[in-house]
Structures are given as structure tokens and as C-alpha cells.
């Protein structure tokens, strides 16, 4: 179960990543954040963002146009 859930549906790049960065600042190491996004470019963006910030992308899936990513703060 995630520690935080972010609804970023309807936001376009860079909105979802900006929301994720803001929420991540208040998280503790090992917290899990789930973000829901409708922007199709988010999948590539979140992979790159996790690599650059040293956070762990646990999963990303798409269902009916909504991308759900689970990220653990390191």
C-alpha cells in the first residue's frame, strides 16, 4: 500500500513530474508514492527522473489511458 497517492490526471508535461517532485520532498526514505497520470509521455519521463534522482521505480502500468507508477524514495 502506498504512503501517498498523487492524482496528476489531466496534467501535461512537466506537470506530473513537478507534482511528484513536490510530494517527494515531504517523504521519508522507503516511502512509496503512487502517481496516476493521463499524459502518455509520463512513462519515459518517470523512468528518467527516477534514474537522475536515485529513487526506485517499483512499477508502472497502464489501464484505460491512465498510467500508475509506484516509486520508492531512496
Image (cartoon, rainbow, N blue to C red):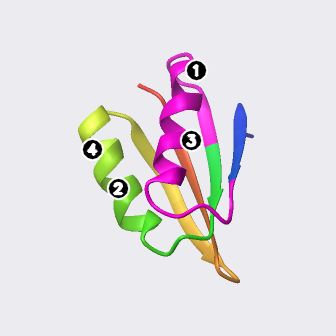
Local crowd size for mark 1, using a 10 Å CA cut-off: few (<14), some (14–19), many (≥20): some
Q: Which residue is mark 3?
A: 19
Q: Nearer the viewer, residue 30 or 46?
A: 46
Cα separation between marks 1 and 2: 19 Å
Cα separation between marks 1 and 3: 13 Å
**Mark number displayed over residue 27:** 1
Q: Do the numbered discs 1 and 3 sit on residues whose CB atoms are within 8 Å?
A: no
Q: Is residue 63 above or below residue 2?
A: below
Question: Which of the 4 image quarters holds residue 39?
Answer: bottom right
Indicate the secondary structure of the residue bearing disc 4.
helix
Q: Which residue is mark 2?
A: 47
Segment tinted magenta in the rendering: 8-33
Q: Nearer the viewer, residue 1 or 66?
A: 66
Q: Which residue is mark 4?
A: 51
Q: Do the numbered discs 3 and 2 sit on residues whose CB atoms are within 8 Å?
A: no
Q: Earlier in the sequence, mark 3 or mark 2?
A: 3
Task: Look at the image and tell me whether residue 2 can be seen.
Answer: no
Q: Residue furthest left?
A: 52
Local crowd size for mark 2, using a 10 Å CA cut-off: few (<14), some (14–19), many (≥20): some
Task: Look at the image and tell me whether residue 22 can be seen.
Answer: yes
Cα separation between marks 1 and 4: 18 Å
Q: Residue at x 52, y 52 (%)?
A: 15
Q: Earlier in the sequence, mark 1 or mark 2?
A: 1
Q: Residue at x 38, y 35 (%)?
A: 55
Of badges 3 and 4, nearer the viewer stands: 3
Q: Is residue 17 above or below residue 9?
A: above
Q: Earlier in the sequence, mark 1 or mark 3?
A: 3
Amino acid at each position: 500500500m502506498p504512503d501517498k497517492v498523487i492524482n496528476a490526471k489531466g496534467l501535461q508535461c512537466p506537470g506530473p513530474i513537478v507534482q511528484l517532485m513536490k510530494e517527494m520532498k515531504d517523504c521519508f526514505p522507503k516511502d512509496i508514492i503512487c502517481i496516476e497520470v493521463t499524459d502518455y509521455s509520463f512513462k519515459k519521463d518517470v523512468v528518467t527522473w527516477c534514474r537522475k534522482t536515485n529513487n526506485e521505480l517499483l512499477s508502472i502500468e497502464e489501464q484505460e489511458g491512465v498510467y500508475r507508477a509506484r516509486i520508492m524514495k531512496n
